[in-house]
Amino acid sequence: MAAVALLFTACDDDKNEIVQEQEIDMSDFYVYTDFNEDLSSKSINSKEKFKTCYSMDVLNKQLDANPGLAKKMYDVEYNTRKFITAKGKPGGKPGNGGGNGGGESDVDVLPIEDGLGTINIPVYVHVVLPNANDVSNSQIQSQMSVLNDDFNSSNANQLPSGASNFVNDATVTDVSFSLAGTFRHNDNTSSWGTNNAVKSAYPPITPDTHLNIWVCNIGGGILGYAQFPGGNSSTDGVVLLHSSLPGGSAAPYNEGRTATHEVGHYLNLRHIWGDGRCKRDDFVADTPPSDGANYGCPSYPTVNCNTSDMTMNYMDYTDDACMYMFTDGQRNRMRALFASGGARAAMAGN
């Protein structure tokens, strides 16, 4: 009888496991985006046309070149949602509660107790320019400081007047960055483009355990691009326009927040507007739905999809001086990567 009881218990456990697997809602997941690199038809000024992140364009091309990448990214997303669900209440479905094009945007999301502690990411910086000393050591150190301030809600920026409904959403990610080394390469290449050529010329160093950042001239007015978790380790990392570093000439995008934005992609964050229309999600419950990027320093409220945009979020396209926050939902999503079995677990020693 004990053996029979044990058998039934095992069967019940199997059923429970199946139920738990079914509770991970992946119905809104996507990999390809509607990225459009032609900004000429948008009613934005020339300054704002410069605010261009090519991470989604790069992702689309990588998906075309590597048929197995979509499955890898699906698995990364599944593990991320499973971890968040197991550790806390995600505040509704994994994506934003307003992803239906106009629902409630103020979804209650709290930082999950993940037991990971402070996560320190060691960083290798590769400066690739005709004169690699054009980017100074002090600029690189300032960039590291900006990353640490932004990821831990200690920068000097402020919410727009009237946006107090977002004040409780700003979070400390408890992710820090430390400079592990700087490598300078004098290279006369005038522009590197977005096909990872700079990474092929100067490969990443131990990308499983280190964030590699290439600082160069990308060309085409492009500020940067990053690789999402799940991609090939030989191209893993972030590429930045050299003049976007603090003190560079790419004003108003020269306070180091291109790096913050691109590292957000590197840590599995999508653009705040989901790279689609109102129904396209960024997989974060406490970011309101929107149908496109914001530029400049928008006043509050900027309303799209029947909700007020979180224009001050680092994953929008606003000026560096007007970026202010990550949310608790974004925090949980990033930190899930460092848990055991996560796509960047090796960085946290898991």
Image (cartoon, grey):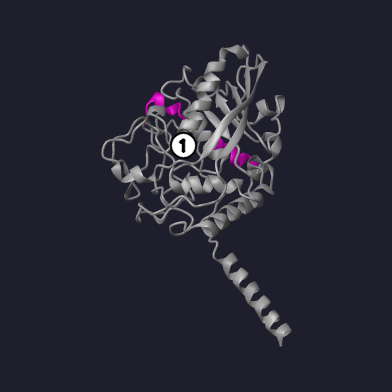
Question: Compared to 14, does 286 lie above or below?
Answer: above
The reply to whether residue 221 is in sight is: no
Identify the residue at image location x=63%, y=42%. Answer: 348
Label 1 secondary element: loop
- Quick check: 52 above or below 254? below
Q: Give residue 196's quadrant in the image.
A: top right
Residue 21 percent location from the top left of the image? 59, 65
Which residue is labeled 1 in the image?
A: 152
Say which residue appears at 55% left-offset and 44% top-offset.
Answer: 117
Image point (60%, 35%), residue name: 121
Residue shown at the point (71%, 24%) measured from the top left: 201
Q: In front: 106, or 303?
A: 106
Q: Which of 213 and 28 is in front in this view?
A: 213
Residue kind at label 1, given as amino acid type: Asn
Q: Give 29 or 4, whichever is nearer the viewer.
A: 4
Quarter assignment of residue 54: top right
Check the image and report above or below for 215 versus 272: above
The magenta span reads: 44-62
* Residue 48 lies within the magenta run: yes
x%, y% of residue 115?
56, 50
Q: Quadrant of residue 308?
A: top left
Let me know if residue 74 is in the magenta part.
no
Left or right of residue 216, residue 172 in this image:
left
Can you say which quadrant of the picture contains the N terminus? bottom right
Q: Is residue 188 visible?
A: yes
The percent coordinates of residue 221 (x first, y second) are 50, 24
Q: How many marks?
A: 1
Magenta stretch secondary structure, dominant: helix
Mark 1 crowd level (few <14, some 14–19, many ≥20, 10 Å Cα): some
Q: In this view, which residue lies farthest toward the right?
A: 3
Q: Please state the horizontal and vertical placement of residue 105, each as a whole percent of the image.
A: 36, 52
Q: In this view, does 284 lie to the left or right of 15?
A: left
